[in-house]
Amino acid sequence: MLITWTEDYATGHREIDADHRRIADLVNMMNDRMQSAPDAIDEAFRTLESYVATHFEREERLMAEWAYPGLAEQKTEHAALIRELQSIGKTLGRDEMAVSRLVMFLAKWWAAHIGRSDMKYVPYIKK
Ligand SMILES: [Fe+2]
Ligand SMILES: [Fe+2]
C-alpha cells in the first residue's frame, strides 16, 4: 500500500473524507496493478481521473458555501492537477516507467494537497 490513511488527513467532513479515502484507494489500486494486472492500470487511471474531477467540484462548491478565503488558491491547485492528469492520460499504458512515476507523483500530490492545502479550510467548515 502506497498511501496509508491516518487521522492527520481527516477534515471531519463526512463527504470530503470519503472522497479523499476513495482517491487514496484508487492510487493504491494503480500501485497494486503495476505488478498484478498491468493491463488494468489504464482503467484504474480513468476511474481516478473522473473521481478526482467529481471531488474537486464538490470541494469547490463547499468551500464557496463556507466563504473560505483560500478558494482561489485551491482552484489553481485543482486545475493544475487536472491538466497534469489529462496530459499523462495521453501516453499512459505505453510506458512502464511512466506508470511508476505517475503513481509516485499521485501519492506525493495526495499527501501534500490533502495533508496541507485541504487542512487549511478545516476551521471554515460549516456542517
Ligand atoms: Fe480534497
Ligand atoms: Fe482540494
Image (cartoon, rainbow, N blue to C red):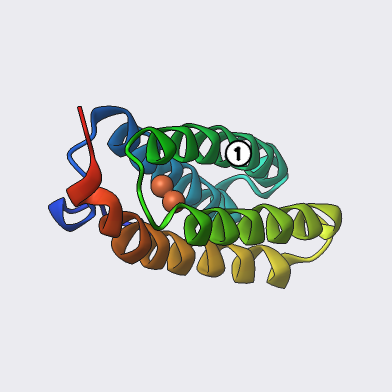
Q: Looking at the image, which residue is at 42% across and 59% down? A: 110
Can residue 17 be seen from the camera position used here?
yes
> Quick one: 72 or 82, which is closer to the camera?
72
Residue 116: image location, x then y, percent: 31, 66
Q: Is residue 49 left or right of residue 5?
A: right
Q: Is mark 1 within 8 Å of ligand 1?
A: no
> Quick one: 60 or 6, which is closer to the camera?
60
Q: Looking at the image, which residue is at 67% across and 50% down? A: 38
> Quick one: 106 or 14, which is closer to the camera?
14
Residue corresponding to mark 1: 53
Q: Amino acid at mark 1?
A: Ala
Q: Looking at the image, which residue is at 17% across and 39% down? A: 12
Residue 52: image location, x then y, percent: 55, 41
Q: Residue furthest left?
A: 7
Q: Quadrant of residue 81?
A: bottom right
Can residue 10 be seen from the camera position used here?
no
Q: Looking at the image, which residue is at 39% across and 68% down? A: 112
Secondary structure of residue under mark 1: helix
Q: Quadrant of residue 49?
A: top right
Circle count: 1
Q: Is residue 40 left or right of residue 77?
A: right
Q: Quadrant of residue 19?
A: top left
Image position of 104 with respect to 16: above or below: below
Residue 90: image location, x then y, percent: 85, 54
Quadrant showing the C terminus: top left
Neighbour class for label 1 at 10 Å: few (<14), some, many (≥20)?
some
Quadrant showing the N terminus: bottom left
